[in-house]
Amino acid sequence: MINMVENEVIQNFTQDLITDLVLTALEQRRLSGLSELLRLITKATNAYGCILWQVVPGLDLQADPSNGLLFVLDQWMPGTHPLLMHNLPVTESIVGEAAHTGRTINVKDVPNDDRVFKTNSWVPNAGIQSMCATPIKLRGKSSDNVIGVLSLYRNLPQPFEESELLQSEQLARLIPSLYSAIRDRVSQDLIRQINDLLHQADLQAGTVSSSTNEMKLVFQQVCNTVADTFQCLEVSIFLEDPLEDKPTYRLTATTWPDFIHLWKSTYQPTEQDGLTGWALKHGQSVKIFDLLHFERDIVTIREQYPNLVWKDGLNLADALRNSLGLEAEVTLQPLSFMAAPIKTGGKILGILRCSTAKRGPYYFAEYELDLLELVAAQLSRFWSSWLTKKGLEEEAQAWEITVDRVTNLNSQVLKELNQRLPNEKKIFSELLRIIPLVIKNTAYSGIRLFDPSRNDLHYEVIDGDFLDSLGRKERERQLERRFPVGFPPTSAGAYAFQRKEVYVIQDVDIDPYYAKEKLAGTKRAIIAPIQVGNEILGVLDIRCAIGSPPFPAYAKNIAALLSQRLGLYHYLATTISELRNAQSALEKQVETQTQTYEDLSHQLKTPIIQIYNRANFLLNGYHSPREVQENLKTIRSLCRKSKRVTTSLRLFAALARGEAIPVITVRLEYENLIKLLNEAVPDSQLMVDPSRNIKFYVDNNSFEVLYKKTVFVDIDLVEQAINNLLDNAGKYSFSDSEVKIYGGLTKSGEFFLSVANEGLPIRPSETKKAVERGWRGDQALWSTGEGSGIGLWIIDNIMQALKGRLEVIPTTSSHITQIRLLFR
Amino acid sequence: MKILCVDDDHIVAKPIIDALAKEFPGTQINWVGTESEFYSKFEQIATDHPSIVIMDVMKLWARASPNLQPPPEEIKKEGIYRAGIRCALRLNSDERTKDIPIILHTVLNQTDIEGDMTKLKNTHYLSKEGEGGTFSLIKKIRELLSI
């Protein structure tokens, strides 16, 4: 930049002045360092003071000088000389004329020259005698490109000589380069300072988990540093509030706390929310030359910032006068404003805002905005990194709590699973209580299980203070809801269930599947499938209330883990229940088998003892032929009973092992059957106490159908079936009754053998149960001293083996019960 | 002399009654078939005061009949397997019958009813499968009644 200084300028000044100017420029740490340069120029030109004017940006002085305006960029005067005006019209002043004509104007007699603006009280007060105004042009450009004016004021009797005017013009050409040098130096210094600040904060954040308040201090330091560099009253940082439902940017730090209360402390990213709102909505920087002339410049401003809306509702001018202690007649400097978004990628994290310079230069140029954007970029890197770190810390903490709670839950689940009948609802409720602790902003959670019989989901348990606040009825209504799992899905639960993936709904009002789950007051939802392997058992349902911030990103993974846990618990509870039931059934089966074997053993032991005793009786002493005959008949009957019990034992053992009953079929001849019945019936008759007067009667003629009908049977199995039936009939018949055995053909041509008796009833509702193993009617249980209720069960199995069937015809109103064997 | 035989199986009871009648002529021998019949006839039994009771252990509550009454809950719970023990306890617990000797005549092994036997007084175990059959029973009656 300095090498841009032209040789001819150097020739007209001493080497010392140039050196002083350059060194002074390079020493500056603030933009207001420009006034120091003006002091050196004042001194070198033997002037009283000096003002550097700038043409209002965007104005075409040549086209319409009447509208042209100049404002004070900076000034140097000895002592305190507040300017009464900052804006000068081009057409009504010496300075304006210099700007308009592009020529240096020399005024040798200020007190008597009408062109000099006399209302500036400092001019007569300082005894100004002469002045000169030199236009500042962009290097190499024509006079049309006047960007400002350097005006020198002298209180000496000698006016500016021609040579001094030439020196002034040469200095004016030097000023842009020197100012540029100051800006570069200031920029580097600011970036370095901010970098140091943030680096330091980063280091601290790396060692200790820094709180949000500590971060606020860092941002305050950044604001202070920027304010010091730009010499402005207000530098503020607004950052997005993560706890808000809608994007909301809240004041985090400011250099003007006394005044900021007049401004808004929160902004939404909308065009209606002023300059800051516009910048947040568009993610673009905003720079306004002078807020006090916003309405005047509105057309130009909106060309650059479409739809920008701003109103000076706070009366900034008065606020600024009060703050700076300026009198009412003093014209205010331009109230420049600039704001740069703090953003990373497409995400707007916040905004850095800067306004109201308290010293020159008063105007924020593009250069200053670029610098502010650089600072905003630094903040963005720092803040996004901190947020990421904070997010990771939060996530790590959430996972830590999750692991801890799930570990505790595992112990509780284990305890519950050790119960004879694990209470799954209790396990589910315990898990739901974990969710608000590990997934922030959870207002309500529930578990919906799949009901295969109805092909829908229904709430098994629900939890959450939010639901309690809705009242008992809403809670009950929620529990009664059903969610069909058809296709296409009609609820978010069904959608997640079918996709077998966690479904996150950021806004339930616009979700295409959510309608069915609608619950007043909820805004967001996470629905995670509960599954074991490929089997889906239901869904875990987590909701967030309206007004709550969104679920953190990690919530999805935690929900997935918890739903997997649920699946596992459900699987374990179900499996253990099934195992216990199976074990219980097995134990019962073993007990029944043992009991059956004991019963059969007893049934066998009694006749054997009797056979033994009766044989002994016959062998000892003399007995009449009738006595011998009777005892032998009893022995035969007891033998038949023993044979029947032995066969039952064999068949029971085979059936208990799940084996089929072996069958050897022969044709059932009439004669064979009658012979069998004629042996079986008297033996059964003998087993019945004669005092009960129960008569067995065989209708031989009814079996003559066997001459016409061919029936194949296993004769031993038929004998066993008949013996069992006769034994039952003997036990369950009433005294003084008849047991009738008869046969015939059914309407469909099946051969049947029926045993009908008058005795204890079998109700219609019991006919199916009657053939189950171990069944005995209530009354039968107390009227038989032996037997384990396997008689009909064995007969049923025999008939199945013979491809026939057993039919139990329930007791009629005349107490007749009929058991029928049907043969193919 | 009076002998009471409590057994639900007539195949067992009849030869016993025949043998006792032959062995102890003039003796009054009564037969009760079921547990419910025993309770219903208890007053008569107490009044008659048999010299000895031959008691089967496992026996049914009642014969099949149109008016079959269910047993009390405690009997339902215990089942038929200890019916004879219950009847013996009833004899033991009544002042009029407590001194009547009881022979538990059963197919059960002695070890099966060892626990129950400790609750009973004047009660003696005799297996139905003894070598002598009814001879053992007669011998036991003679021994207990000293005849």
Image: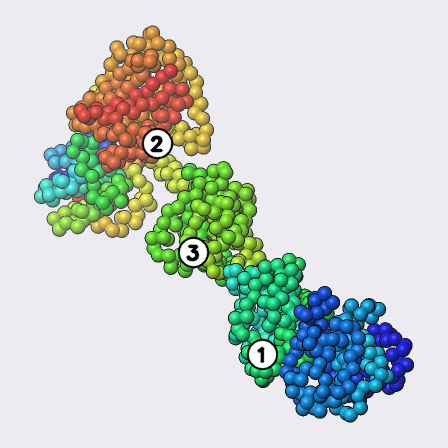
Q: How is the image coloured?
A: rainbow
Q: Are marks 2 and 3 in contact (CB under 8 Å)?
A: no
Q: Amino acid at mark 3?
A: Gly
Q: Disc 3 designates what residue?
A: A521
| Residue A175 seen anywhere in this rendered image of the structure | no
| Residue A808 seen anywhere in this rendered image of the structure | yes
Query: Percent x, y for residue A15?
Result: 88, 84
What is the distance, in whole Å, between disc 2 and disc 3 at their CAs? 57 Å
**Category of crowding for the residue at label 1, using alpha-carbon neighbours closer than 10 angstroms: few (below 14), some (14–19), many (at least 20):** some
Q: Disc 1 designates what residue?
A: A320
Q: In front: mark 1 or mark 2?
A: 1
**Category of crowding for the residue at label 3, using alpha-carbon neighbours closer than 10 angstroms: few (below 14), some (14–19), many (at least 20):** some
- Comparing A186 with A558, the one in front is A186
Chain containing mark 3: A
- Comparing A700 with B66, the one in front is B66
Residue name at image x 30 percent, y 45 percent: B113
Query: Percent x, y for residue A757?
Result: 22, 23
Quadrant housing the N terminus of chain A = bottom right
Q: Disc 2 designates what residue?
A: A772
What is the distance, in whole Å, between disc 1 and disc 2 at their CAs? 101 Å
Chain containing mark 1: A
Quadrant housing the C terminus of chain A = top left
Find numbered disc 1 in the image and state the secondary structure of the residue it sits on.
Answer: helix
